Amino acid sequence: MQMMYKVVHKTKMFGELVMFSHTLFSLPFAIISMVWAAGGVPSWHVMLWSLIALVAARNGANAFNRVIDLKFDAANPRTADRHMPRKLLLPREVYVFVVVNFAIFILAAGMLNPLCLGLSPAAIVLICTYSYTKRFTWLCHLYLGFTIASAPIGAWFAVTGQFAFIPFIIGTVVMLWIAGFDIIYATQDIEFDRRTGLWSIPRAFGLEVGLLISRVLHGIMVMLLLSLYFIQGLGWLYLTGIAVSVLLLAVEHRIIKPSSRRRMQLASYNLNQVISLTILLFTLADQFLLG
């Protein structure tokens, strides 16, 4: 019984380490990509292995980032209470977790099709290199978005085994969206980043310009979502979902207050989880009720 408790407790800590609940950022767009690629409901085989691949890749990347950023997380008062700075999880444990998840990711990619298997090593390199970008460029937010954009692009490949134009539009939407709210999140650490030599758009250009860039990125994201309405021949339910999402984005930018951790959590994470689910639900409703 005690052994079972330890296993459950350790699993819970790893879930918290990689912020498992934040899978909601990429998963809804991956589902949309699969549905559009299949022209309906994909096979259970594709959905199962795509989900396994997405979760494993994300878990491995986030855990790797925690190890690489350990010294910065320990020095930053905002992140000093995370698992690794508190030594609740040791680097060697986390590295094992990373290797296991990437092995599962490659296995899942192989179960999908040769294209996914062939691209899986490149995907691992892509999502791991993000951890280093904040050390030398303020473009790190866009690079983060670019890595997460691989989820809907890979989901399309999982269904069709072929390159296409649409998944790259979806991927660009995700990239701009993620980069926009990552900039918002980074406003909390402007002074810390300056002291430690880390880079971010708010650190490089200041708070006001950083938030303006975030709004511009989200504005372009909305225009791309609207372009998909015409390209995919979608209906009023999809447009309704986009309208609701625009309102939520407006609220997100309205409540920003870097000195309030609660507000920043709400703006950077909670509202964006609702946005992705809103776009997913209205898009699926449009696809299956109006399509």
Image (cartoon, rainbow, N blue to C red):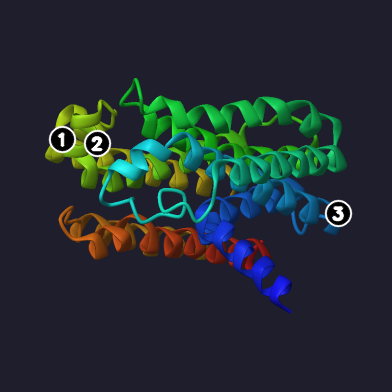
Residue found at x 24% / y 36%:
213
Residue hosting label 1:
209
Q: Is residue 8 left or right of residue 24?
A: right
Circle 3: element type: helix
Q: Looking at the picture, tell me which residue is in the foreground, 154 or 237.
A: 154
Tag 3: Cα neighbours inside 10 Å, few (<14), some, or many (≥20)?
A: few
Circle 1: element type: helix
Q: CA distance from mark 3 to mark 2?
A: 41 Å
> Mark 1 belongs to which amino acid?
Val
Q: CA distance from mark 1 to mark 2?
A: 6 Å
Residue 244 falls in image quadrant:
bottom left
Residue 281 falls in image quadrant:
bottom right
> Mark 2 belongs to which amino acid?
Ile
Residue found at x 61% / y 48%:
59
Q: Is residue 14 above or below residue 132?
A: below
Residue 114 marker:
none
Residue 192 falls in image quadrant:
top left
Residue hosting label 3:
45
> Mark 3 belongs to which amino acid?
His
Q: CA distance from mark 1 to mark 3?
A: 46 Å
